[in-house]
Image (cartoon, helix red, strand yellow):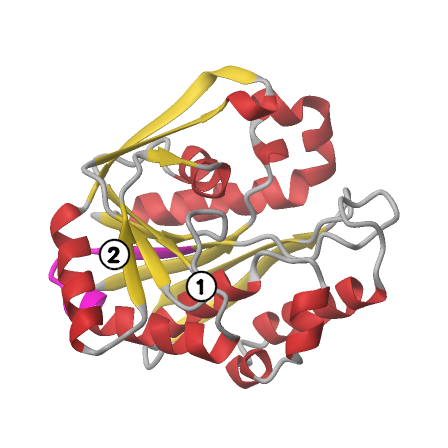
Amino acid sequence: MIIFSAIVPHSPLLVPSIGKDQREKLSGTIAAMQEIEQALYITKPDTICIVAPHGSRYPDAYSINMSPKYVGDFKTFGDFSTTISNKGNFLLIDHLQRKMREENVPFTLTSNENLDYGFSVPILLLTSHLDPWKLIPITPSMLDGNSHYQFGAQLKRVLHAESSRVAIIASADLSHKLSKEAPGGYSAEGEAFDKAMTEAISKNDIQALLTMDPNLVENASQCGYRPIMTMLGCLDGIKVKASTLCYESPFGVGYLTARYDIV
């Protein structure tokens, strides 16, 4: 069954060996991540499903990376010593893919034990005290928000019926266009997107998220909307207490953290 869920950013600057002094500017996000780490530890998930945007993506199909084990590192960011390693929940992934195909969901499996930072950053920061647990890495498609919400609802029908304990994490950065120094430069649409997202999430207003202007979503230069919509779909029909913990953007990228406790 699903026992906890959260939205977290995946900036490599959150990793101590990479962010170093820059982490001071992310103190709110770091404190929120620590709170979510504690919540995960208390709820003791057997499996964590992480929905992250940087894996093998397909325009019109969702994807799960099926591997007996996964490894990740941060060599791309100059850290050659920090690594993560996790077992995959092979049986549950197989159960999910069979159900998706039965329901004619546009879905595919990949197999790659190497994880990118969209998965590795949350794993490193949220699970250092959690053991044992297994991973299911999920990658969204390029379909719209409503399609991802429905995909999440289909995942929920399998995951929430399981006897094992499952947590759902959306690994999601918001707009990358919030200042002139941002990776994508400044855009008023980026600012408008983040405002709309944070307001809707703080109110747990699913309808506002489902009806968001598609042009605004695409022009905001973001990588979080689809993972978030998938995660929220996984909570469809489940009573939750939603809490926005932090939003900040010191480097021109929107970092949102929120937790969803099952009540």
The part of the chain drawn in magenta is: 158-169
Q: Residue at x 78, y 48 (%)?
A: 252
- Quadrant of the rendered image containing residue 207: bottom right
Give the structural element (helix, strand or loop) at label 2: strand
Instruction: Report the front residue among 2 and 208.
Output: 208
Q: Is residue 19 left or right of residue 120?
A: right
Q: Is residue 26 above or below residue 72?
A: below
- For residue 166, the mark is 2
Residue 70 horizontal/vertical position (percent): 29, 34
Residue sitting at the far front: 59
Instruction: Report the amino acid beneath label 1.
Output: Ser
Indicate whether residue 159 is drawn in magenta.
yes
Residue 45 makes an appearance in the image: no
Instruction: Report the front residue among 132 and 99.
Output: 99
Q: Is residue 128 above or below residue 165?
A: above
Q: Is residue 116 left or right of residue 213?
A: left
- Quadrant of the rendered image containing residue 114: top left
Tell me the quadrant of the picture where the N terminus can be found.
bottom left
Indicate whether residue 10 is drawn in magenta.
no
Q: From the viewer's perspective, is the residue at label 2 or at label 1 nearer? A: 1
Residue 38 horizontal/vertical position (percent): 40, 43
Residue 94 horizontal/vertical position (percent): 14, 56
Real-space Cα distance between discs 2 and 1? 22 Å
Give the structural element (helix, strand or loop) at label 1: loop
Q: Is residue 15 left or right of residue 105?
A: right
- Quadrant of the rendered image containing residue 77: top right
Circle 1 is placed at which residue position? 141
Q: Residue at x 52, y 21 (%)?
A: 75
